[in-house]
Image (tube, coloured by chain):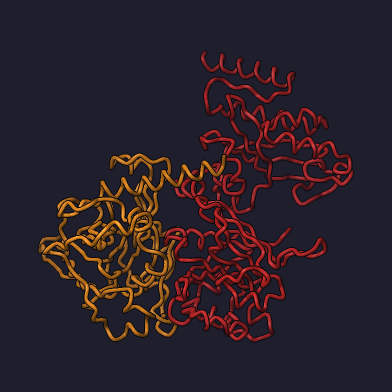
Chain colours: A orange, B red
Amino acid sequence: MNLKKHKLFFIAVYTLCAVIMSVACSTKQGISTQAPSAVATAQPQERTAAPIPADAILGTDKFPSNYKQRFSNFEENYEFFTVNMIMILVDSSSVAIDYPISFLLPKGWYCLNSPDDIPIYLGGDELFDTRTYIYNSFGDCVGAIGLRHSSFYNKESFKSIDDINNFYMDINSDEDYYFTTREYYFPVSYSTLQFTDKYSAAALTQVFYSEDYLAQHGIQSDVPLMNPAIVYRYGTSITYLCFEFDCDVVNFNELSDIARSLSWNNI
Amino acid sequence: MKFKRFKKIVALALLTALIMNIGIFVSGESVPSSDSSYELITAYFDCINNSNWDEWLDYYIPQMQPDRKLFISDKTNFEANFGVLTIKKANILDIVPISNNYVLSTYPELEQYAPDLNNILCFRVRVNLAVNEENEYFHSGENNLIITLLAQDNELYVAALCVCPENLLIENAITDFDSLAEYKAATMNQLYLDFPRITSSLSKPLFCVNFLMPSKRNYTASPASMSKEKYHYMYGWLENDLTHSVYYINDNKGNVVGAAGFTRSNSNYNTESMFDFSTIEALDELTSYVDVFLQEFPLDSYNNLDDYNIDYINNYVEKIEQSEDYFHITVMTKCDDDIPCTIIASYAPQIKAFFVLELSSAYFTASEIMDITASIEFSVDK
């Protein structure tokens, strides 16, 4: 009885992921919108790499020299990306500011700034000022990067976990879709020698979707959904970026590698 | 008007149930009202007060009655004052509805009796007890208990009575049913491990660790030993496992997907510590917990960690947690061997012990690893 229930639950979650991705991740070319998790685990041999869109941001195999101190075996598994995110200051000046960031993603993945359909990652098109979407080699949208300002905090540095939660209050306070920084906040270290401040590093967390939020996006589910995520502040400013990934596309080691690879190019 | 009529139905149902010893009938609703729940709880404790154990038995869901019947049929259990049998008198002070997430994580087997989780109702019962002899569950004076009721086929039964953990009282979590807890209750099960493992009736664990594991694969733990098939996980630890510290983690298909073990810290071997980690506040002052970890983890005793290519120098993420009994620091790193793994190492300074989980990356998602890590708690076997 119990086993049957677990099986049913697994099927439900599996179906949910497929539905989410089909709703959220239509790619520009109209390539398969099947959930990457389903593809990766069930029928990997039946899929081939999708054509890469002309405006895709691609990774390279040229890595910064300091990555050798941060990672092991990174050249086998990852490519190095630089994405220029642009945010327009919402004041009288309306000045556009560039925020070039660098990071690792698994080999064969690419980024798109303006897909035809806006996936629901990172709260759709409302929560972040600017977003870039992440695709795997099959052309499935598997995550997103977003940039925004904190409305609640302007201290130079974090001194406590309360400071962190206040800083991210724009994204951690809605009960239907939120970054769970209050419950999960795992800062990553570049190395034990470089880890000088546990509060300034990029941190791993999770994103929570309530059943109501999923229903609003046409997805019926009896249980909430959690996706892995990364939050990272831009130095001492009020700007920060967030990554959100589909729940099945990166394991913990890959997520922490991506977080540890993050750097702001103009700091 | 409707409410009065409903109360009459409930009263009639209570009376019928008491006479016929068949549990409590409630109206046609799938989720019973608080009134009927309170009356059931009161009647349940009345049975204890009157030592009417046959009737007490009938309040339990039918599937659980055979076990409890065996329990009350054995006179030696009464003589030994086992469990609830030690209670002479119970005076209920108050009954407060609470979320069912704690009980669902502690007794995941309840879910098989109630496919709709809304049919599982939990209440904190503050009760003044007089006992024959104190045992691990009940003592004389004020006790905080959790009673779990379950609606089954339009009848309401008792499913479990347990001690209310202190942290539920402290954090006031008992009045909130937060959505994250709901998510965990729906997707995770609690796993309890004693360290060292119990090897005889005379041995006693030093401490217990409990943590959440994804329920979809129904993970269990089994004692690990060198005589078994050689698994990758913590093999080096097993070679030195004089303290019976290692368990394998198994999924519901019999696959070994990881291991869990414990080791004592360097401070335990009289090495003077550079850091003050006597209190959670002192620890919180530290810039990085990685320093503490590196100083305290007995790397020399476990040189095989190098053989496993555990990236203990470069790849840490960290978390400090306050649990019911002991605060602890948790760091996570990876092992890039033939089978890539995530290592979760949790250090409890007060008992100078590390709890380490090594889990295959092929079986656990990033979110699951975070759920597991955030749920680790140390406790003593009281």
Q: Tell me which residue sits at (59%, 80%) in the image.
A: B296
Image quadrant occupied by the C terminus of chain B: bottom right
The quadrant in which residue B4 appears is: top right
Query: Most extreme residue toward the front, as rendered?
Result: A45
> Does residue B380 lie above or below A30 as drawn?
below
- Left or right of residue B303: residue A117: left
Q: Tell me which residue sits at (25%, 56%) in the image.
A: A140
Residue A40 in picture, x, y percent from top left: 34, 58
> Does residue B296 lie above or below A225 as drawn?
below
Q: Tell me which residue sits at (49%, 49%) in the image.
A: B187
Q: How many marks?
A: 0
The quadrant in which residue A89 appears is: bottom left
The quadrant in which residue B10 appears is: top right
> Does residue B15 lie above or below A59 as drawn?
above
Q: Nearer the viewer, residue B270 or B254?
A: B254
Q: Nearer the viewer, residue B169 or B159?
A: B159
Q: Is residue A148 visible?
A: no
Residue B371 in picture, x, y percent from top left: 48, 58
Residue B311 in picture, x, y percent from top left: 46, 79
- Left or right of residue B126: residue A90: left
> Does residue B374 lie above or below B146 as drawn?
below
Residue B370 in picture, x, y percent from top left: 46, 61
Q: Is residue B143 visible?
A: yes
